[in-house]
Structures are given as structure tokens and as C-alpha cells.
Amino acid sequence: MDFMKFIAPVLPGLSDVVVESDRMEWLQVDREGKAFIKVLAAEPTGTWVVLYRFLAGYVAPKHKHLAGIHTFIISGRLQVRDAILKAGDYLWEPNGMIHDETRALEDTYYINIADGPLVFFDDNGFTHYAGWEQMLKLKQKAEMKRAAS
């Protein structure tokens, strides 16, 4: 058996994807101007990857994970439930986790790799939903804005 034929990719044209995040604009995702994202990937598999920038004092709203999320803190400090996460910390949040508020204790940069959506809520019920489709729309909007400038 020809080994290379055995291990060859099934999808023709399969290749790496490089994202130059330093060339992307930050997208504001809150009303106060303290939460920003760069959408690095958003795939029909349900996976989405986002670089976050939370300014000190920002409080992310309550939400439930409808799939697992991997979080890596690049710089700063976040309070997530009873834990204080700092640069270099990794957090795994399994499917089904419910968050009260997440608080930026200082300006913080971190990456989330989400295996599926989040649903946001307040004391009155559902407020919004975030998944790969919403992230892809944000990414496309940012790319169109960049291309127009």
C-alpha cells in the first residue's frame, strides 16, 4: 500500500489558516465601551475562537454554556465565580456551566475557544445568544469595513 495515498487529506485544497490579529480592528461589544473582540475563527462545526479585551471594571453578563469553552488568559486578571484568573491561567468550562457575572479586575486580554454557543440572560429571562453564526457575521462585517478603508 502506498502510505502517502493512505494519509492524504480527503478534502482537496486543505491548508492552514493564518490570522494576523494585529491587523484586525477591535469590535466593541458592549454599550459602555469596555468590551472588545476580534473574531479569529467561526466554523460551521460550531467552533468559534475569539480574542477578548476587557477594560478594568467591565462586567460580562450572566450566561450559560451550551457547549464547552477553553479560556487562556494572556494578560490582566478576571474574576470568574470564586476564581481569580491571571496571565498564563487556563480555564475549562464544560457544557452546561452557568456564570454569574465575570469581572475584569484590570485590563485583560484572553482567548476563548468555544465548541458551541452561549445563551445570555438576566433576572427577566433570555437576552441574547452567541454562537459561530453570530461570530462569523461580526467577522465579515469587520472585514468589509477594513476592505472599504
Image: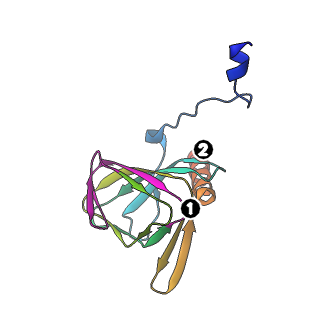
Question: What residue do we see at 25% from left, 62% from top?
Answer: 105
Residue range highlighted in magenta: 65-90
Local secondary structure at mark 1: loop
Q: Position of residue 70 (x, y in %)?
A: 44, 51
Q: Is residue 81 magenta?
A: yes
Dot in front, 2 or 1: 1
- Residue furthest out toward the front: 1
Q: Nearer the viewer, residue 50 or 148?
A: 50
Specify the label residue 117 is tagged with: 1
Q: Relative to 57, is 133 on the left or the right?
A: right
Q: Estimate how packed mark 1 is, as few (under 14), some (14 to 19) or many (20 or more) residues with alpha carbons within 10 Å.
A: many
Question: What residue do we see at 57% from left, 56% from top?
Answer: 135
Q: Which residue is mark 2?
A: 147
Question: What type is the residue that disc 2 sits on?
Answer: Ala
Image height check: is 105 above or below 114? below
Question: What residue do we see at 56% from left, 69% from top?
Answer: 129
Question: What type is the residue that disc 1 sits on?
Answer: Pro
